Amino acid sequence: MTITVWGGATSRTIRVHWALHELGLDYEPKLIGSRTGETQGETFQCLNSKEKIPVLVDDDFVLTESAAIVTYLGDKHGLLTPTSGSRERARYDEWTSYILMELDAHTLYIIRRHNDLAHLYGNAPEALRAARDGFNKQIRWAEMKLGDSEYALGDSFSGVDILLTSCLDWAHAYDFELADNLNEYRATLHERPAYKTAAALNFSISAGA
Ligand SMILES: N[C@@H](CCC(=O)N[C@@H](CS)C(=O)NCC(=O)O)C(=O)O
């Protein structure tokens, strides 16, 4: 049984490297970067016609989408995810949907598209303003739900913490002022040995332009 992970250098790819390190699984990292042309290579296109990283290959099983990969790995290895059908799992899914839609796709990625990637997606100052306002509004839900807890789901570390930390770090890099409890939460999670090893690996290459 062999596991390979394609992709490095981004907030989406660290999610998969971190999950694998939390689970203590051996795998082969193929650290290709986004917008370097490597996602357009023939081998990679056969794995993911979306031409996006990260991609997990678990033996003969190919899986794309960072959150789906983290959840699959957690379910398969009995860690990082609450049992399917439980209320805890419903909370996990609620957090995951919120992080992917409200923090990642609708706000942070809009900023990436019309700022760093404006040469591809165009300058759109109104969209940038709305995305920054939108993030500031949406993040209040996480601030309130998290309160003083160490982990998003309360007592134990889960895939939600991986996804949420990746977005908080991304927001920090975009100069958002995060609430004290969110900064304390990030700092605590950054102390996890699995995070440290995964981050060193993930960011050992730089993203393309
Ligand atoms: N929803 C996807 C987003 C994946 C995505 O957009 N990846 C970017 C890097 S963060 C990418 O591969 N872009 C392709 C390229 O630009 O070459 C996920 O969470 O996995």
Image (cartoon, helix red, strand yellow):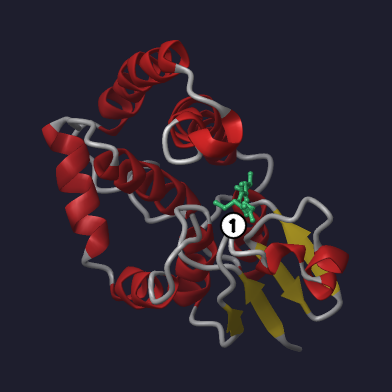
- The residue positioned 60% from the left and 53% from the top of the image is 66
- The residue positioned 37% from the left and 54% from the top of the image is 156
- Who is closer to the viewer here, 124 or 162? 124
Circle 1 sits in a helix, a strand or a loop, which is it? loop
Residue of label 1: 35
Q: Residue 47 location, x and y as percent? A: 82, 66
- The residue positioned 40% from the left and 16% from the top of the image is 134
Quadrant holding the N terminus: bottom right
Q: Residue 167 location, x and y as percent? A: 39, 42
Quarter occupied by residue 6: bottom right
161 relative to 96, above or below: below
Q: Is residue 106 left or right of residue 196?
A: right
86 relative to 12, above or below: above
- Who is closer to the viewer here, 180 or 54? 54
Q: Can residue 207 be seen by looking at this rendering?
A: yes
- Within 10 Å of the Cα at label 1, are there few (<14), some (14-19), or many (20+) other Cα atoms? few
Q: Kindly give the residue lying farthest to the left in the view shown.
A: 180
Quarter occupied by residue 180: top left
- Kindly identify the amino acid type of the residue bearing the numbered disc 1: Arg
Q: Can residue 90 be seen by looking at this rendering?
A: no
- Who is closer to the viewer here, 63 or 9? 9
- The residue positioned 17% from the left and 30% from the top of the image is 177
Q: Is residue 130 left or right of residue 16?
A: left
| Callout count | 1
Q: Residue 203 location, x and y as percent? A: 38, 70
Q: Is residue 191 left or right of residue 159?
A: left
Q: Residue 7 location, x and y as percent? A: 59, 68
Task: Classify mark 1 as within 8 Å of ligand 1 or not, answering yes or no.
Answer: yes
